Image: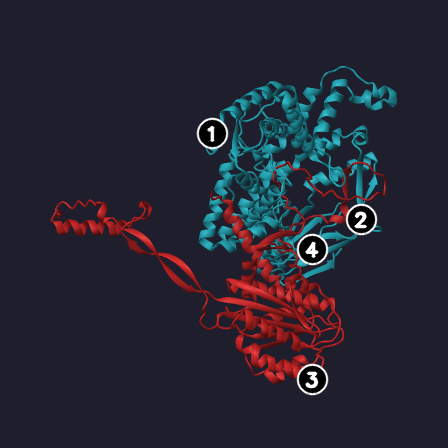
Amino acid sequence: MALNIDQDHARFRDIVKGRIRQNLRKYISHGELLGRQGKDTVSIPVPQIDIPQFRFGDKQSGGVGQGKGDQGDPLDGGQEGDANGKGKAGQQEGQHALEVEVTLDDLALILGEELQLPRIEPKGQSKIASDKDKYTGIRRTGPESLRHFKRTFREALKRQIASGTYSASKPIIVPVREDKRFKSWNTAVQPVANAVIVYMMDVSGSMGDEQKEIVRIESFWLDTWLRSQYKGIESVYIIHDAAAREVDRETFFHTRESGGTMISSAYKLCADIIQKRYPADEWNVYPFHFSDGDNWSVDDTLQCINILRDRVLPSSNMFCYGQVESPYGSGQFVKDLREHLGKDERVVTSEIRDKDAIVDSIKAFLGKGR
Amino acid sequence: MSDYGMRHELPAYLREWQEKIENRARKYGLDFFPQVFEILSFDEMNEVAAYGGFPTRYPHWRWGMEYERLKKTGEYGLSRIYEMVINNNPSVAYLLEGNSLVDQKLVMAHVCGHNDFFKNNFTFKITDQDRRAPESAEDMVVSRKDRVPTRKWIDTFANHAARVRRHMERHGVSPVEEFIDVCLALDNLIDPPGRMLEGRPKVEEPEEPDAIEVPKLKAKSYMDSFINPQEYVDAQRKKLEEEAAKARRFPESPQRDVLKFLIAHAPLERWERDVLEVIREEAYYFWPQAQTKIMNEGWASYWHSRIMTEFALDGNELIDYADRNASVLSSGGGKSINPYKLGVELYRSIEERWDKGQFGKEWEDCDSMEERRHWDRRLGLGRKKVFEVRALHNDVTFIDEFLTPEFCIEHKMFTYAWSNRNDRFEIDTREFRAIKDKLLFKLTNFGQPFIYIEDGNYENRGELFLRHDHQGVDLDLEKARETLRCLFRVWKRPAALATTVDGRATTLRYDGKEHTTRPSPK
């Protein structure tokens, strides 16, 4: 049943979305939304949505309570105001921060509007097809609920005119069984754009918890956006130090290894996985790589560039490299990439100095609409 | 049956109970308007609750926020609304669909108490829509038994909604809604005692000021018209008169009804003025309920206990009833006083004291604890007294008059305060005087600061100047600044508020661009 309040509720949701938009940068850089994620929704604390009034400051006033205790004993627990379940709806709003649930789709929409991200155009023709039924056809048999009224009467009219039982002065048309026409479906083949995101992360000794936090936050937002753009999306997680391996999401964000860095190992694994599981003519492929840019050797860097140029880039929509600044400073890798592949528009690089830079990095990665 | 009842009528068995409970309540002496109960589903109940009890309110996002909160806490089982009742004639109350019979009976009994209170307590006379200016002090307080006041507030609120909707259609939803936000920031700046006296002829007319004399140069009478030429004298007089007009205050005396002042004098569009009027009307409607929270809930709880335990309760419902009653009246502990509990216990204490004759000079003068404990004059005046109290008091006078040291000890009451040293709230004292003072302070003006409009033409610059009558507690400065911004939006000229911050006289001012905080000029 539609209620009056639905309208007010919708207004409220709009205001909340507006608030989220205003504070989006803060939400992004603080990573507040991670861990508040449900299946399709995120619960977001929205600050200050109350109406100001001249009122007393809280701390000076104190009040009267009831219960045991001696002078000087601390109070805890009880909230000021009605603590019980019964009561009239007061005029006073609660004072706690409001938590609002927003769907991930809405969140992606807000992100897109705020960062002015273009919609992604799926590349090429997709070979993946799905069958979809549409009611476009007509049959002579079928259930009454699908009877095509106009067609049925047209058939009856045709028959009556043909058989001479129709009189224009008394146009009564009575369909008989043979006149009846029913709606029916045709199966249409629809191409579906599929996408896969390949997350690669350097977990060598120089990547600290803070760097990983940045990667985590950034990949949450990348994920949210790309998921809103493609229906069926898959994720692959690769971690590497001197060697690379594919892991699940949990491990990806929480592993800390030590040891050297051989970026080429990750690229090789990535190229293999793409080749084997996600052929480029069926999939939109998005490899993202996060590292502190400290590669083992110049040779390895050259090898990386070769793999990228020859194997990864041809099958990807774009390749994004985010260089996170670590306590040991920022590495050389981003410069090497720019030098060798900077002209290729499929390659996007970004340096993420701290959490505040995440927003710009997201914009750099997704701003091309590829 | 009224028109309101047509939406969701009660099933027959509940109607039977309604009749039985109402008859019983009347026998006890309760006196209420005709009552209409409606039965609502969970969602409808939340809607109505979000609207403050009314089926229709003007459109505003705030109701949506409240609705979301109620729905969520309800779905998670954190809270449940059992009853809602509107001060209206006929009275309208809601029952939640699917509640057990014992719950419904409890609510009906509780509602009878509320409605008796709405009809008879003097603070609610402000909601009589056919109210006339009182002729005597007694007139303001005592309800005449035979008079049936008009309180068609459900209709009025629906009309308000229609008015606001019309403005929204005309001027767009957002501008109107934003303006409502602004108005709501000011809706506690009203003057209920003043409203009761509205329409009364002014008692004393200010005396006509003396005619203005222009000082003249001394001259012989035949030279006078040359030394003090008439044109010059006239010009001087005009100037002096103008100055006197400027000196005249505007408003003449500080006004507490800021909304009224703004409606009359702020440079508003017609629709803005209309919206402000709607907000002001509704603020006055809700005011008595805020003034009598403890008394009202206490009274209703007092009566639901009596009606349920003495009459309506079936043997096998006893445990459920006790459980419900306990959750309603639980004192919670810690930082809160449950108004239901405090109210009902005070009524019971009054009843006992007046039954036993524990009042008057003799009682007050008695110092012997032993004698006081066994004091019983068998007067049996309790019932009469509680009915009198429910008519003639509001929360402030109720506590002031009837809170006793014995009561505070019995109910383990204490005051608490913020401890800067330990960065937490701590129990301050259990001393009677302090508890009473604190309670009264919290209740005075419903815990709202006293704010007056002092000058609508401050320093002759057309600025709005307000004064906060500081009584020991500072304002929340952040909120105060935001509110000044709202005042600016209405007044369209800078707005300032004189208050006291940390013991220093301070003036907050907003000039449309920035906030300033300065020590007040002496």
Question: Which percent across, then down, holds residue A247?
Answer: 65, 65
In the image, A197 versus B310, the foreground residue is A197
Q: Circle 4 sits on which residue?
A: B478
The 10 Å Cα crowd at callout 1, few under 14, some 14 to 19, many 20 or more, is few
- Please tell me which of labels 1 and 2 falls first in the chain: 1
Mark pair 2, 4: CA separation: 21 Å
Mark pair 3, 4: CA separation: 58 Å
Q: Given the image, on which type of amino acid does mark 2 rest?
A: Arg
The 10 Å Cα crowd at callout 2, few under 14, some 14 to 19, many 20 or more, is some
Q: In the current view of this chain or complex, which residue is farthest to the top?
A: B378
The 10 Å Cα crowd at callout 3, few under 14, some 14 to 19, many 20 or more, is few
Q: Which mark is residue B299?
A: none
**Res A346 visible:** no
**Which of label 3 and label 1 is nearer to you?**
3
Mark pair 3, 2: CA separation: 59 Å
> Do dots 3 and 2 share one subunit?
no
Q: Given the image, on which type of amino acid does mark 3 rest?
A: Val
Q: Given the image, on which type of amino acid does mark 4 rest?
A: Glu
Question: Which percent across, then down, holds residue B302?
Answer: 67, 26
**Which of label 3 and label 2 is nearer to you?**
3
**Which of label 4 and label 1 is nearer to you?**
1
Chain assignment, label 2: B
Q: Residue at x 84, y 21 (%)?
A: B372
- Please tell me which of labels 2 and 4 falls first in the chain: 2
**Which corner quadrant holds the C terminus of chain B?**
bottom right
Q: Colour of chain A?
A: red
Question: Which percent across, then down, holds residue B130?
Answer: 52, 33
Q: Circle 3 sits on which residue?
A: A298
Q: Judging from the image, what is the letter of the chain drawn in cyan?
A: B
Q: Circle 1 sits on which residue?
A: B2
Q: Which mark is residue B424?
A: 2
